[in-house]
Image (tube, rainbow, N blue to C red):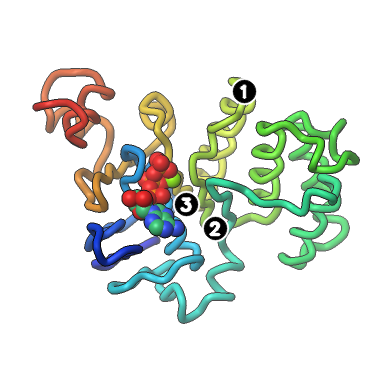
Amino acid sequence: MIEFRQVSKCYDPNKPNAVDSLSLTIESAQIFGFLGPNGAGKSTTIKMLVGMLFPDSGSIFVEGKEVGKDSLAIKRIIGYVGDEPLFYEKMTGLRHLNFIADMYELSQENRKERIGELSAMFEMDHALDDEISSYSHGMKQKLGIMAALMHESRLLILDEPMVGLDPKAAFLLKKTMRAHADKGNTVFFSTHGMEVAQDVCDRIGIIGKGSLLFEGTVQELSEKRGKGNLEQLFLELTEEVPL
Ligand SMILES: Nc1ncnc2c1ncn2[C@@H]1O[C@H](COP(=O)(O)OP(=O)(O)OP(=O)(O)O)[C@@H](O)[C@H]1O
Ligand SMILES: [Mg+2]
């Protein structure tokens, strides 16, 4: 379970809070989609969840442990792909995956099996001996996702993971996310894709200008807002079009 309690973050005191008093609970064994327009506060929220940024106020709990207080224990159970995955570009893809496997202390046998499975699934086996600097944007995105899936993370956190993926890879990722949640793990991801949210999310949260505007199922959103497709509902809720 993930719990945000009254979490706020401000980058610039002359500007409104990037995240403003966010309270949100996400139960385990589900896929939670985090939606919101550009600049709404999704990545800021995610960076606070993974311990890369500290909230100015409020607290975040992961499986009962407070982020920032029990960092190593939390990092061990998290798999994370950021909005701009960074790599040592001179490493090969295989070296990167082994580097991640070292961090999570995976056995040689375990990592070999996992790398084999993941590279076959994401069709990256042919590229693993190449330097990451030679990878396309989508290939780097796939490598980041594979790295996050190397260990059986109880909490998989992905910031806009579909960006740059071709339709087949996006389909495989959605399938992988479902299988991961069905095993009792939690998947928290941000997206701009309403269709993705509809396809794959058990619940969604919509954030606008740092505040949570909606939390529930896609079904509940359409019932709450009346007629209209999901895209219209989203635009109305986030005030991107006049109500
Ligand atoms: N490093 C930073 N320094 C200053 N302001 C920042 C920084 N990162 C984000 N912001 C501001 O915080 C707000 C929230 O940004 P954030 O990146 O969390 O949005 P987002 O919902 O992830 O947007 P997008 O959909 O474009 O990725 C924006 O107003 C942004 O300008
Ligand atoms: Mg973002």
Label 3 near ligand 2 (CB < 8 Å) = no
Q: Is residue 7 left or right of residue 66?
A: left
- Mark 3 or mark 1: whose residue is earlier in sequence: 1
Q: Are marks 3 and 1 in contact (CB under 8 Å)?
A: no
Q: Amino acid at mark 3?
A: Thr
Against 48, residue 185 (above or below) is above
How far, Cα to Cα, is label 1 from label 2?
26 Å
Disc 2: CA contacts within 10 A as few (<14), some (14-19) or many (>=20): many
Q: Is residue 164 left or right of residue 128?
A: left
Residue linked to disc 1: 166
| Quadrant in the picture for residue 6 | bottom left
Q: Nearer the viewer, residue 114 or 8?
A: 8
Task: Kindly give the residue lying farthest to the right in the view shown.
Answer: 129
Q: Is residue 41 visible?
A: no
Q: Looking at the figure, which quarter contains the C terminus?
A: top left
How far, Cα to Cα, is label 2 from label 3?
6 Å
Q: Is residue 38 visible?
A: yes
Residue linked to disc 2: 154
Q: Position of residue 19 (x, y in %)?
A: 29, 58
| Quadrant in the picture for residue 201 | top left
Residue linked to disc 3: 186
- Residue at (77, 35) in percent of width and height: 135
The secondary structure type at the circle numbered 3 is strand
